[in-house]
Amino acid sequence: MSHTSRLTIVQTTTRASPGRRSGGRSTMAEKGARSRGWIIAGTPGWGRAAGAAMGGRSGRAKAAATARATASPPSVVSATQRPRSAPRFRSTTGDTGGSLAPGERRRAPPATDQEHEAMRRRPLLAGALGAPFVPRRAAAQAGDAGLAEVTVNVFPGGFNWPIFAGTARGFFAREGLRVRMLGTRGSMEQMTDLAAGRFDIAMTAVDNIVAYVEGQGAAPIGPQPDFFAFMGSDSGFLSVCVAPGIERFADLRGRTLSVDARTTGYAFVLLEMLAREGLGEGDLSIVTVGGMTQRWEALQRGEQAGTILSCPYDILAKARGFRQLARATQVIGPYQGNVAAARRGWAAAHPDRVVGYVRAYAAAIDWLYEPGNREEAIAILRRNLPDMGAALAAETHAELLDPQEGFFRGARVSEEGLRKVLDLRARYATRPKELSDPSRYVDPTYWNAAMGGGR
């Protein structure tokens, strides 16, 4: 019996409201961030009265020593060929040239995973993982005098744990850096602001860098050959989570799954996982629902049978009776998720800051992995995500610091994982093209300088 369900994109997301402005003088980076989101700076707690900033080495020994003695967390202020059976999207919104289904209306583009999670008026995990960003004026930390400032644009959440720990333990200050975190509401905004030089470093999915270098990004800023990644962080911690009663991928035939948006790397990961499990065109439907929080809520309401989630949403899903069908890396192998990225011109002008950032970030990951630091590490995480309970924090620790699947030791970009990203985008993008030169997107020069060429 053949299955003929057409794969459609149905978009159902609303946009976030702009961030509130605050008074006082601001740097250009602060002004840009304040008009788009939030600024993170100087006191404890993420999303209430606190968050996390950070720092790296630039030869300012005295200032660094002072900063180490006074460091405190900041606050939020502001392959191969595509298998023949691989599923394909049919657009209902015009993003791939498709037409609307009868009775449908065009809707605003959905937020991607990271875009939706950062929306200003939403808690990080709907009350389970942190309060919303609270805009307020950024203030320098005590003891910062003399340190070189680096502005880092981030999406809120546990993925910033190395930054939280690097700040609390003084690893960034030891490198002579004061890191100021700027919050973003989405990848389009983040990439637009990176191109405009409104901050120095972006913590982002490497697929975003590839997309914008190739001129495939959603923001109307054209190709950005100056973008590049210089450090790896993690795999993205992606899993396919499904409704109770679904035991295997074959049970998804005739069902509906959700993704964030058609053009994102995480949607490509889901398509590849399905294809490798023998599910292709006509076997199931895929709809776009929005970011991770929105998809998790829709899954709970029974609107779809499954979706792709990241930690700690997968932990919440399992706790509520849903099934984690498979982790992405178990099906497709190594995958490069989040990286540190910058503009080549800025990095060339500030090599010490880039090298110091890599060295401090890697040191923070090493510290997080030490078994004897577990309790303090969890305390740092909960101080920056104050609504995260003890049990969820403990499970998050187990997943994000899994010896095989956790943060990348040494903060090195996974060459095999990057090849997987390029392969998936080359085959699943709306305008497929061969992507075979990793040096267009990653420059290991700064990592080699920081880590001695190998680790």
Image (tube, helix red, strand yellow):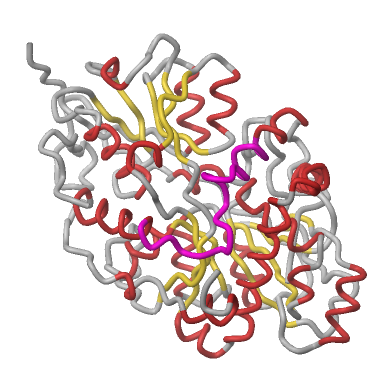
Q: Residue at x 44, y 74 (%)?
A: 195
The residue lying toward the viewer, choosing from 382 and 410, is 410
Provide residue 52's location: percent of width, then percent of height. Answer: 75, 58
Q: Residue furthest left?
A: 1
| In magenta stretch: residue 446 | no
Provide residue 59's location: percent of width, then percent of height. Answer: 75, 89
Magenta-drawn segment:
396-416
The residue lying toward the viewer, choosing from 309 and 235, is 235
Q: Residue furthest front?
A: 455
The residue lying toward the viewer, choosing from 118 and 361, is 361
Q: Residue at x 73, y 78 (%)?
A: 175
In this rendering, would 97 be left or right of 215?
left
In this rendering, would 250 be left or right of 73?
left
In this rendering, would 169 be left or right of 153?
right
Provide residue 29's location: percent of width, then percent of height. Answer: 62, 73
Provide residue 145's location: percent of width, then percent of height. Answer: 85, 82
Q: Is residue 69 above or below residue 38?
A: below
